[in-house]
């Protein structure tokens, strides 16, 4: 089951769910429960402080409760960070939202982003996800 809490307008849940499910299946994983929560920057900062003891803003937090082949997670995405994406990264708000959705999923699939090499691999996967999503989004119009 995949759920979206406060999904920003313009993103179609059906296209997201189909893309997420296809990526999980490709990774030979079942989705038990995956919750995407779109929250304010203040909420994400508080979660970062409380659960990770980090006193700084972030764009995404993924709490992965699953096992290697079963995805069970809560993903929290900062709306503030996605709204700043066009200014900071020359990227649309929609693409940044989809990138963060993918980022959380790939963490659940076992991908890391600590080293430069891991970050580069994560970016490739995120870009592939964005491309897939845009195809699904258009086909559901």
Image (cartoon, rainbow, N blue to C red):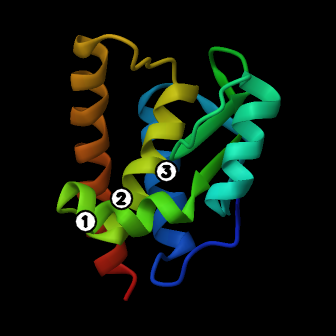
Specify few, some or many for label 1: CA neighbours under 10 Å numbering under 14, 14-19, or 20 or more.
Answer: few
Tell me the residue at 45%/26% (across/down): 27
Q: Secondary structure at mark 2?
A: helix
Give residue 72's position: percent from left, percent from top: 74, 33
Q: Are marks 2 and 1 in contact (CB under 8 Å)?
A: no
Quarter of image, res 5: bottom right
Query: Residue farthest to the right?
Result: 50
- State the residue at coordinates (72%, 23%): 52
Q: Secondary structure at mark 3?
A: helix
In the rendered structure, find residue 101 and report the number of the disc placed on it: 3
Residue occupying image coordinates x 29% and y 79%: 138
Density class for disc 2 (Cα within 10 Å; few <14, some 14-19, many ≥20) is many
Q: Is residue 89 left or right of residue 76?
A: left
Contact, CB < 8 Å: mark 3 with mark 1? no
- Report the residue marked by disc 1: 87
Report whether residue 31 is seen.
yes
3D distance between C-alphas at marks 3 and 1: 20 Å
Residues under labels 2 and 1: Cα distance?
11 Å
Q: Residue furthest bottom?
A: 141
The x, y position of residue 99, in whole percent, is 37, 51
From mark 2 to mark 3, how far is it between C-alphas? 9 Å
Q: Which residue is under mark 2?
A: 96
Which one is nearer the viewer's eye here, 76 or 11? 76
């Amino acid at each position: 089951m995949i759920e979206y809490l406060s999904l920003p307008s313009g993103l179609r849940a059906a296209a997201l769910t189909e893309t997420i499910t296809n990526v999980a299946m490709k990774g030979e994983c079942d989705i038990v429960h995956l919750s995407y929560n779109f929250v304010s920057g203040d909420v994400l900062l508080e979660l970062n402080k409380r659960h990770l003891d980090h006193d700084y803003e972030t764009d995404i937090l993924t709490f992965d409760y699953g096992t290697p082949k079963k995805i069970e997670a809560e993903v929290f995405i900062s709306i503030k960070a996605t709204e700043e994406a066009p200014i900071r990264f020359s990227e649309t708000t929609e693409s940044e939202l989809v990138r963060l959705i993918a980022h959380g999923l790939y963490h659940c699939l076992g991908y890391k982003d600590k080293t430069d090499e891991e970050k580069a691999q994560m970016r490739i996967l995120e870009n592939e996800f964005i491309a897939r999503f845009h195809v699904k989004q258009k086909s559901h119009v």
